[in-house]
Image (cartoon, helix red, strand yellow):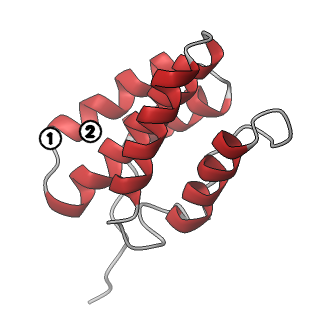
Amino acid sequence: MSREAPATPSEYLHAIACFNAGEYFAAHEWLEILWRRSVGTERCFYHGLIQAAVALHHFHRGNRRAAHRMAERALAHLAEVPTPFQGLDVTDFAEQLRRFFERPEQMPVPRIVLG
């Protein structure tokens, strides 16, 4: 009997496409669908990604204070998630987010890349 990896939810793929296109509010909406029906580590994972999207949304709207606060919350949630998770190198993504908010003028915007 072979064990196949669970299928990637289409909402997750939509969220990633939106996030990587800089459509952070839309990414947040797709991720929230998944977050609402998840539990445990999966819920923590989606919560961290939602907060990362919200942080970048605030940042691009010029609300740097709220952006930094939300990025800190995202990093706290993502620190609770093993890597890889849902095809994402969570540690790498969290590091991208952390570096971006340390030096936004010098770092590329974080991207979600599945392995």
Rendered view: 9 above or below 40: above
Residue type at mark 1 is Arg
Rendered image: mark on residue 34: 2
- At x 33%, y 63%, the residue is 6
**SS at mark 2 in the image:** helix
Crowding at dot 2, Cα within 10 Å, few <14 / some 14-19 / many 20+, comes out as some
Q: Nearer the viewer, residue 34 or 100?
A: 100
Rendered image: mark on residue 37: 1
60 lies left or right of 15: right
- At x 69%, y 51%, the residue is 99
Question: Outermost residue, right direction?
Answer: 106
**SS at mark 1 in the image:** loop
- At x 36%, y 55%, the residue is 76
Rendered view: 25 above or below 21: above
Q: Where does the image place residue 97, in percent across and percent down from the top left?
A: 60, 47
Crowding at dot 1, Cα within 10 Å, few <14 / some 14-19 / many 20+, comes out as few
